[in-house]
Amino acid sequence: MAPVAMRLAAQSLSDAQPVPFWLEDPGKPGALPALTGTEKCDLLVVGGGYSGLWTALLAKERDPARDVVLIEGREVGWAASGRNGGFCAASLTHGFGNGLARWPGELPKLEELGERNLDGIEEAVARYSLDCDFERTGEIDVATEPYQLDELHGMYEEIERLGLADGLELLDRDAVRAEVDSPTFLGGLWDRRGVAMLNPAKLAWGLKRACLDLGVRVYENTPGLDLVSVGAGMGVRTPYGRVLARRVALGTNVFPSLVKRVRAYTVPVYDYALMTEPLSAEQLASVGWKNRQGLGDSANQFHYFRITADHRILWGGYDAIYPFGGKVSAEMDHRPETYLKLAEHFFRCFPQLEGLRFSHAWGGAIDTCSRFSAFFGTAYQGKVAYAAGFTGLGVGATRFGGDVMLDLLAGERTERTELEMVRRKPLPFPPEPIAWAGIGITKWAMARADENGGRRNLWLKTMDRMGLGFDS
């Protein structure tokens, strides 16, 4: 980074508050009391992020008489569900390319299910009056290097060949800059309907209210400590009590699963984001962005960015930090060296916004697995179900995961449970220190590929053949 660029980037961060922008909201609901004593229920949901909230809501929609309890270790939405960029995607497979590589025969069905899932989210936003700034604006994948432009064109041709290109539009340099103006943009692929933008914390808080209105009993500051079989059902111990349930759905994602054998399938990855102060009318005019799409560049180490309801720009991604041993720690929630790097990249993308300052800077952990998209399963003779490994697409795909868990707990064969994606697990990550070394080499190789026209070296090609990966 040049000294002048570094100085300007540092100055832009001088007033940035080290807290997630979305969670610093005066409308944030108060925490509900912790569980004390013994509760009994038909279904216990562990986890108060999107995964748990959607599961509880869908369970009551399927059977209003079902007695549902949800426990959350801290406050609803405080972790990844309240810290993400607010991209709510239809994709269940972490994008078309990943889906085509892993489930080519199922991809049309997976795309259809993903579209229906996003429609279901939009319907729930309307039905329950979820005040979360939901806008189905779509997303543009932008090319900032010539090889990325070639890749976008190749991907569009493949999507078109499979008859799945409805709603997609290739944009040349002038067309993409007419949407959002950056001198770094060479072209783009606009998915007009497959992504919605929203306020992630408000979505979590709205789902909490909807669950309560349907009769779900929610306990916050109530972590699940262990899971045991109790007669025909299950028991989960908490700090001040326990829950006895006929069935249990685990939506703990990045946090250690109560089913210990599941833990090897995920690792935590820390992702970081900046939020600007509101743009002035002149600044808004200089970038355009009238259609308010989400954007992401097409590098291996990619940025994601979007504009908010009050005309701020969220800018995140690029660095993906894996802590040795896979430990989730509050110390990792902030990383000034990444904030500085992100700020410099921001002004390289939008030089016309020089002088704009960042109001917030934060990070958080997401769970990733070796196939970059969720996996599912059961334990304790089908009395417990889990979904994990959403790898950054949890804003949308967790609702689908909730449906899958409920299908599995009911012992039903559905179009979801018949999917190879649902029936098979990803490859587990190796133990330390092999995981640390392997992830480090993969990150280095991905950066080298970005610097060398996208050419993947022998390490990345081997990882591709093995079905292993690490996503930035």
Image (cartoon, rainbow, N blue to C red):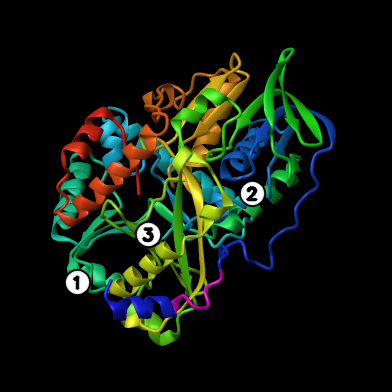
Mark 2 Cα within 10 Å, few/some/many (few <14, many 20+)?
A: many
Mark 1 Cα within 10 Å, few/some/many (few <14, many 20+)?
A: few
Mark 1 vs mark 2, CA separation in Å: 40 Å
Mark 2 vs mark 3, CA separation in Å: 25 Å
Sequence order check: which comes first, mark 1 or mark 2? 1
Badge 3 amino acid: Tyr
Q: Nearer the viewer, mark 3 or mark 1?
A: 3
Position of the N terminus by quadrant:
bottom left
Sequence order check: which comes first, mark 3 or mark 1? 1
Mark 3 Cα within 10 Å, few/some/many (few <14, many 20+)?
A: some
Tag 3 residue:
304
Tag 2 residue:
207
- Asked if the residues shown at circle 3 and circle 1 are in contact, with their CB atoms under 8 angstroms apart, the answer is no
Q: Nearer the viewer, mark 2 or mark 3?
A: 3
Return the mark for residue 166: none
Tag 1 residue:
174
Which residue is at the far front? 433
